[in-house]
Image (tube, rainbow, N blue to C red):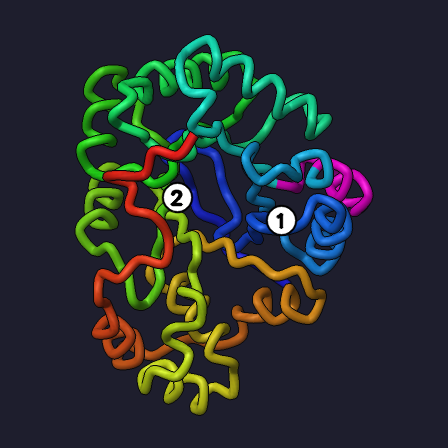
Amino acid sequence: MTQPFLTLNDGRSMPQLGFGLWQVPAAATANVTMTALRLGYRLVDGAAIYGNEAGQGHGIRASGVPRDQVFVTTKVWNSAQGYDSTLRAAEASLKRLALAHVDLLLIHWPCASRGLYVDTWRALVRLRDEGRALSIGVSNFNAPHLHRIIGETGVVPAVNQIEVNPRLQQPGLRALHAELEIVTQSWTPLGQGRSFAAPPVAAAAARTGKSPAQVILRWHIQTGASVIPRSTRPAGLAENLDIFDFALSEPEMAAIATLDEGARCGPDPATFEMA
């Protein structure tokens, strides 16, 4: 199976489709990761706060897939923000993963009221320069957060991982990403199934013989975003991966675009401050 890759603004490449480990139980993570990699996934999206980095690392090693063929992401949690604490948090993540480096390290949330995300970003730049994180980016950053870290450091994130699904399409932020050459990576890409029965999705599923979930994942791919759905079942992992043998038409893409309501499944980055 040939999967598409996206070129990051630092010149590196990232698989466009991956799988996420949010809410995957720690005891199941190694097996889920191993299964996904053996099925053909090559991007594993984790985070310190998920509590399953050790399993993520075990699954990568158990899969038999060479390390240089697996794109590993983790994230710095809110309570670790700040320059020195971010360096310590990254080292702790690498120790749990049992890896010398990650392919992508993200700031998980801006937590703007704490005033630490610029210092956190400076720490990520150092980690990149030291080779501990080959690429660096952010997650859940809005336009003001992006403009500030770029303005104060001159370093543009390679990725901004944000909530995107048919009911929350964030066209303004995605347009800014395109202007700045930041890859949009979609979390909660299926929107908790809210659009599965929507007429544009159902019609495309009927035409293609694919499931509503596959139609929505294909929509993400055709918008140019990276997408990281989650499943703990081998059948679900295989279904999410099976989206490269069909395409949505321009009218189908346009119809799905009309589903945008600006309705979030997750927290609002403008106000989310959980430690």
Tell me if label 1 and label 2 are in contact, CB under 8 Å: no
Q: Judge depth for marks 1 and 2 and give the one in front.
A: 2
- In percent of width and height, residue 268 lies at 28, 46
Image position of 220 with respect to 42: above or below = below
Q: Residue at x 24, y 55 (%)?
A: 170
In the figure, is residue 68 to the left or right of 112? right
In the figure, is residue 232 to the left or right of 200? right
Q: Which mark is residue 42?
A: 1
**Label whose residue precedes the other's in the sequence (1 or 2):** 1
Q: Residue at x 54, y 35 (%)?
A: 49
Residue placed under numbered mark 2 in the picture = 161
Q: Residue at x 74, y 51 (%)?
A: 28
Amino acid at dot 1? Arg
Secondary structure beneath disc 1?
Answer: loop
Secondary structure beneath disc 2?
Answer: strand
Q: Which mark is residue 227?
A: none
Magenta: main secondary structure equals helix
Q: Is residue 64 magenta?
A: yes
In the figure, is residue 243 to the left or right of 261? right
Q: Residue at x 34, y 82 (%)?
A: 198
- In percent of width and height, residue 195 lies at 37, 75
- Write down the region rendered in magenta: 57-70
